[in-house]
Amino acid sequence: MERRKAFLEGVEIALNGELKLPRELRRELNLNEKELEILKLLCHDSLTDQAIAHRLHISLRAVQNYIQHLKVKLGIDEVEQKDINSRIALCITAIQKKLLSF
């Protein structure tokens, strides 16, 4: 029943034209291979967006979009992360969720 409620809240938010997901749904999303690769380059190799774009032969804008999607999927909210850089928060969260290891 909780999952249904979270789904309906997500639908309502989407119908209102907002781009955000309830936390319950965010946690259930899986990352695709490209997202995992970008996460690794960002966190392990400490590459900039431009360097990631160059390494993967994709546009800078595509990298920025992937990173934004990663933030949403991993639940990194700008409002909640005022005291820490969102990229660092993204890497910390990825490690905590065992998506990356060092």
Image (cartoon, rainbow, N blue to C red):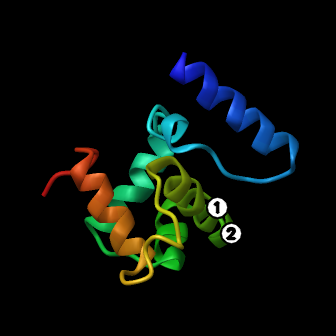
Judge left or right: residue 12 versus residue 72: right
Q: For the point 86% across and 40% down, which residue is it?
A: 15
Q: For the point 46% across and 34% down, which residue is it?
A: 30
Judge left or right: residue 10 versus residue 55: right
From the image, tell me which residue sits under label 1: 65
Quadrant for the C terminus, please. Answer: bottom left
Q: Residue furthest top?
A: 1
**Crowding near the residue tagged with mark 2, few <14, some 14–19, many ≥20 C-alpha atoms within 10 Å:** few
In depth, the one of 86 and 17 nearer the eye is: 17
Look at the image and tell me whether residue 42 can be seen: no
**Crowding near the residue tagged with mark 1, few <14, some 14–19, many ≥20 C-alpha atoms within 10 Å:** few
Q: Where residue 61 is drawn, which disc sits there?
A: 2
Quadrant for the N terminus, please. Answer: top right
Q: For the point 55% across and 53% down, which residue is it?
A: 72
Look at the image and tell me whether residue 44 can be seen: yes
Q: Amino acid at mark 2?
A: Arg
Residue 3: image location, x then y, percent: 54, 22
Q: Secondary structure at mark 2?
A: helix
- How many numbered marks, from 0 up? 2
Mark nearer the viewer, 1 or 2: 1
To which quarter of the image does residue 84 belong? bottom left
Rendered position, 3 above or below 94: above
Rendered position, 7 above or below 44: above
Labels 1 and 2 touching (C-beta < 8 A):
yes
Residue 89: image location, x then y, percent: 35, 68
Residue 65: image location, x then y, percent: 64, 61
Q: Amino acid at mark 1?
A: Asn
User: Distance between the Cα atoms at labels 1 and 2?
Assistant: 6 Å
Q: Secondary structure at mark 1?
A: helix
To which quarter of the image does residue 22 belong? top right
Q: Where residue 38 is drawn, which disc sits there?
A: none
Q: Residue furthest left?
A: 102
